[in-house]
Image (spheres, rainbow, N blue to C red):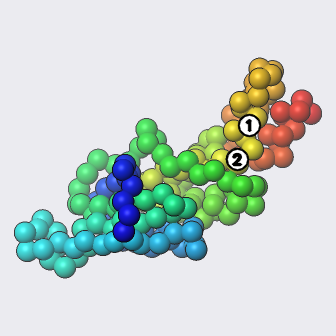
């Protein structure tokens, strides 16, 4: 397995294996487990149970650490997903918010407490527009949304 120089590690108190299976199901053919390690007699987990799973989503590697009690995840760190179109936004939003929490401005907290930003790729171009009035309209529109609506953002950008 080729390792990335820097890999995000997600520490799950429990349900880590379940979370990894869930992420693999959400991202389908673009996701896979690369490596697993297991606890030994040295502990602290039950010998033979999963300690870590290195998994990949869209070419990005993550490590799920099944490490026991820890502080909960918060929005200070999130996973941002660059979505090709509204259909991808809709699909990922529905999957990741199920059992989780829909948040403002394209953010969703999944059932495991991990925060995701589900963002249509086109929005990056809109907010980088050299026309400050167009950017302001897009931002104002975005602040009224939970799941991002690409057509509404396009309309705001165009001044419609």
Q: How many marks?
A: 2
Query: Which residue in the protein does label 1 denote?
Result: 125
- Assign a secondary structure to mark 2: helix
Image quadrant occupied by the N terminus: bottom left
Image-based side of 27 in relation to 1, left or right:
right
Cα–Cα gap, marks 1 and 2 = 8 Å
Q: Is residue 39 visible?
A: yes
Residue 114: x and y, percent? Answer: 45, 53
Image quadrant occupied by the C terminus: top right
Please, is residue 19 above or below residue 145 in the view? below
Please, is residue 114 above or below residue 152 in the view? below
- Residue at the outermost left position: 42
Report the residue at 47% width, 72% height from top: 32
Report the residue at 89% width, 33% height from top: 158
Label 1, residues with CA under 10 Å away: few <14, some 14-19, many ≥20: few
Image-based side of 2 in relation to 158, left or right:
left
Image-based side of 48 in relation to 79, left or right:
left
Report the residue at 76% width, 35% height from top: 126
* Quarter assignment of residue 133: top right
Query: Which residue in the protein does label 2 denote?
Result: 121
Please, is residue 17 above or below residue 94 in the view? below
Of residues 126 and 136, the one nearer the viewer is 126
The answer to whether mark 1 and mark 2 are in CB contact below 8 A is yes
Please, is residue 2 above or below residue 28 in the view? above
Report the residue at 76% width, 28% height from top: 129
Residue 131: x and y, percent? Answer: 80, 22
Q: Is residue 15 visible?
A: no
Residue 16: x and y, percent? Answer: 35, 66
Label 2, residues with CA under 10 Å away: few <14, some 14-19, many ≥20: some
* Quarter assignment of residue 41: bottom left
- Residue at the outermost right position: 160
């Amino acid at each position: 397995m080729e390792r990335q120089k820097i890999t995000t590690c997600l520490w799950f108190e429990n349900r880590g294996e379940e979370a990894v299976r869930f992420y693999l199901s959400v991202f389908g053919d673009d996701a896979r487990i690369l490596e697993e390690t297991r606890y030994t007699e040295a502990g602290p987990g039950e010998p033979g149970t999963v300690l870590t799973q290195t998994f990949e989503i869209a070419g990005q590697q993550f490590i799920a650490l099944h490490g026991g009690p820890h502080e909960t995840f918060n929005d200070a760190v999130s996973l941002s997903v660059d979505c090709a179109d509204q259909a991808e936004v809709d699909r990922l939003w529905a999957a990741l918010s199920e059992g989780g929490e829909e948040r403002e401005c394209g953010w969703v907290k999944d059932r495991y407490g991990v925060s995701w930003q589900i963002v249509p790729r086109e929005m990056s171009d809109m907010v980088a527009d050299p026309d400050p009035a167009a950017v302001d309209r897009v931002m104002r529109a975005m602040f009224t949304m939970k799941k991002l609506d690409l057509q509404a953002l396009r309309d705001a950008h165009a001044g419609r």
